[in-house]
Each structure stands twice: as structure tokens, then as C-alpha cells.
Image: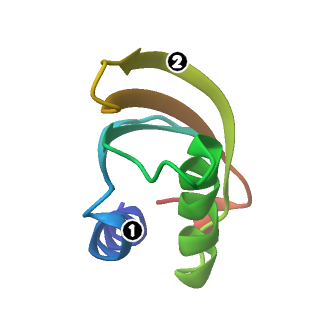
Amino acid sequence: MEKLKNVIREFNRLHGSEAKVKIREVRRDEVILEFEGSFCATCGLYDYFEDIKWEAMDFGLKIEPVEVLEAEEDEFERGRYVVKYKLIGGKEDKP
């Protein structure tokens, strides 16, 4: 769980002006994350979901986005997205 918290802190430090993420739930082999923000209009939305994957690798954690569970957008280009990730690897790679 500490690795995942470090990933979240780093993502929020790098992307916090556009999007922030928080942990909603951690299961045996899944992580549910919630993204919220204005998101960069020139970036692809799914790039944010992939960026968590790359940040996690820097901390020795392997996760892969598999499904957007919830998506809410308003007319001011703000949104909230709940994304399920699969944890990949052995016990040593768990969050």
C-alpha cells in the first residue's frame, strides 16, 4: 500500500494543476482510482490513466488500466473518472 501511496503523491505533484487522483479501493489484484480535475485539453484523457502506470513502474509497482467504471463531465471541461487497474506480478509487487 505504501508504494501505491507514493505513486499517487508523485502523480499529484506532477499533474495536480490539471488532474488529481486518489485511491478509492484496493483489492487483492485490483486498484480502483478516482481522477478529478480540468485535465489538459490538448492531452488525451486516457493519457492520464496511463501516466499512473508509468509512475508506478518508477516505484516498482506494475499496474495496468483495464476499465473506466464511472465518467462524469460538466460543461466547464471538468470531470471525474473512476478507473479500475489490474495489479501485475507477485506478492512483492503488491501495493
Q: Distance between the residues labelled 1 and 2?
A: 20 Å
Which residue corresponds to mark 1?
Answer: 11
Q: Which residue lies furthest to the bottom in this view?
A: 58
| Camera-side residue of 42 and 13 | 42
| Camera-side residue of 41 and 58 | 41
Residue 71 at x, y percent in the picture: 45, 18
User: Residue 20 — which label?
Assistant: none
Say how many tags the image has: 2
Which residue corresponds to mark 2?
Answer: 69
| Dot 1: element | helix
Identity, as a three-letter code, of the amino acid under mark 1: Phe
Specify which label sits upstream in the sequence, 1 or 2. 1
Q: In this view, does 44 lie to the left or right of 35?
A: right
Tag 1 and tag 2, C-beta contact below 8 Å: no
Examine the rendering and report whether any part of residue 29 can be seen.
no
Q: Which residue is drawn at 54% across and 73% down?
A: 55
Identity, as a three-letter code, of the amino acid under mark 2: Leu
